[in-house]
């Protein structure tokens, strides 16, 4: 069930603790209808869900907070990084389309994907500059800059996932577990 996968892999995004999460999900017969229904439900709460890639019967699903991603992409340092990776459009749709293209063209994940997941720019740059080696610590991502803050974030995400799994298992629906976007 897709709603269970969202709880297991994207609770921090539902809780507004993280910009986005990424996970693979097997595409069964009911997947298109379930995906469409959950997508509509989440959009009403400020969360967007899209498929970045389909391969071998699995969908690579990206669940994210669109307004937060938009602000992140507008950051000067992030924009410079994306430009070096071949991005030419910096509106939300343009950046996501470039990410989709890069995911489909490369054999591995493009390193800038950390930006789309809300990882600190310094850690994304550190990963690229060090080829994934020499990190200070490793958790949800490889950390190159602020180890203490990263550990706090890792613990928040871990606790959030456990709480959301418990609530979901007790019958709390996904709609109630998704923190709505703040009104403007």
Image (tube, rainbow, N blue to C red):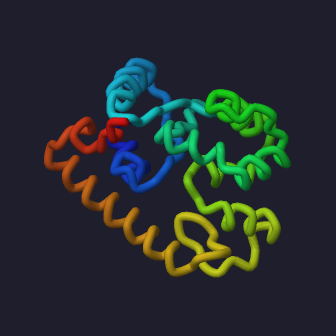
Measuring from the top left, give residue 161's x and y in whole percent: 34, 58
User: Looking at the picture, does residue 38 appear above or below residue 137?
Assistant: above
Residue 123 lies, in percent from the top left, at 67, 67
Q: 119 or 170: nearer the eye?
A: 119
Tell me the quadrant of the picture where the N terminus can be found: top left
Q: Nearer the viewer, residue 86 or 157?
A: 86
Q: Is residue 1 visible?
A: no
Quadrant location of the C terminus in the rendered image: top left
The answer to which of 74 and 112 lies nearer the viewer is 74
Quadrant of res 45: top left
Residue at the image position 49 percent from the left and 29 percent from the top: 27
104 versus 77 height, above or below: above
Please identify the residue farthest to the left as the structure is shown: 170
The answer, for residue 150, to whether it is visible in the render is yes
* Farthest residue, direction front: 184
Where's residue 151, x and y in %? 48, 76
Q: In the rendered view, does 21 fall on the left or right side of 82?
A: left
At x 53%, y 42%, the residue is 24
The residue lying at 53 percent from left, 30 percent from top is 50
Q: Is residue 33 left or right of residue 112?
A: left
Quarter occupied by residue 97: top right
Q: Exactly how many numbered labels are in the figure? A: 0
* Front position in the image: 149 or 141: 149
């Amino acid at each position: 069930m897709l709603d269970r996968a969202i709880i297991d892999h994207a609770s921090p995004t539902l809780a507004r603790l993280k910009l986005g999460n990424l996970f693979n999900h097997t595409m069964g017969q009911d997947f298109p209808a379930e995906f469409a229904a959950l997508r509509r439900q989440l959009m009403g709460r400020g969360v967007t869900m899209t498929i970045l890639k389909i391969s071998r019967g699995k969908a690579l699903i990206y669940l994210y907070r669109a307004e937060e991603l938009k602000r992140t992409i507008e950051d000067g340092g992030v924009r410079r990084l994306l430009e070096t990776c071949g991005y030419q459009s910096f509106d939300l749709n343009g950046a996501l389309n470039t990410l989709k293209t890069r995911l489909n063209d490369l054999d591995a994940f493009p390193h800038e994907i950390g930006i789309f997941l809300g990882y600190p720019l310094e850690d994304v740059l550190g990963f690229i500059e060090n080829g994934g080696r020499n990190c200070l610590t490793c958790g949800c991502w490889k950390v190159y800059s602020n180890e203490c803050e990263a550990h706090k974030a890792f613990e928040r995400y871990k606790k959030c996932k456990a709480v959301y799994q418990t609530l979901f298992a007790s019958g709390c629906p996904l709609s109630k577990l998704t923190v709505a976007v703040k009104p403007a």
